[in-house]
Amino acid sequence: MTVMHPRKRIDIFVEMAVLPKVEEALTRAQVTGFTVVPCIKGRGWSGEWSSDEIGDAGRMVMLTTITRTEALDVVLESLRPVMQRWRIVVSVADVQVLRSEKF
């Protein structure tokens, strides 16, 4: 049987202009890797939106990372100042990884 290891996946939806602040928060929490993907369109509590703007100011992206369970609180506390000032959505999920040394 293949051994899997528990980790936490954190998905962060944020405006592109705020992404450096999120990256700084993850670095403070010693998260070593993440992936950023563009968001095309969506709908939320403020209505529908789309990323058809010319600049990055209002463009939305999703940053996703997988980290050790014990690092989750550090990550969330590092993000708290960003969440208080900027439009940001954070979700957390339990995941299993095959190569524990990578996360």
Image (cartoon, helix red, strand yellow):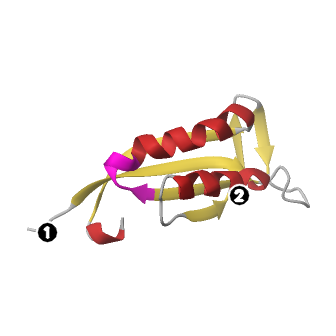
Q: For the N terminus, which image quadrant?
A: bottom left
Q: Is residue 81 magenta?
A: no
> Extreme top residue here?
45
Circle 2 sits in a helix, a strand or a loop, which is it? helix
Q: Which residue is mark 1?
A: 2
Up-down: is 31 above or below 80?
Answer: below
Please state if 49 lies on the left or on the right of 72 as rendered: right
Query: x%, y% of residue 34?
Result: 53, 64
Front-most of residues 31 and 19 = 31
Up-down: is 19 above or below 89?
Answer: below
As shown in the figure, which amino acid type bears the numbered disc 2? Pro
Quarter assignment of residue 39: bottom right
Query: x%, y% of residue 52?
Result: 85, 56
Q: Which residue is mark 2?
A: 20
Residue 101's disc number = none
Residue at (47% x, 59% y) in the render? 31
As shown in the figure, which amino acid type bears the numbered disc 1? Thr
Quarter assignment of residue 72: top left
Front-most of residues 11 and 72 = 72
> Extreme left residue here?
1
Please state if 93 lies on the left or on the right of 57 as rendered: left
Q: Nearer the viewer, mark 2 or mark 1?
A: 2
Q: What is the magenta range?
A: 66-71
Please state if 69 lies on the left or on the right of 9 as rendered: left
Query: x%, y% of residue 82?
Result: 67, 40
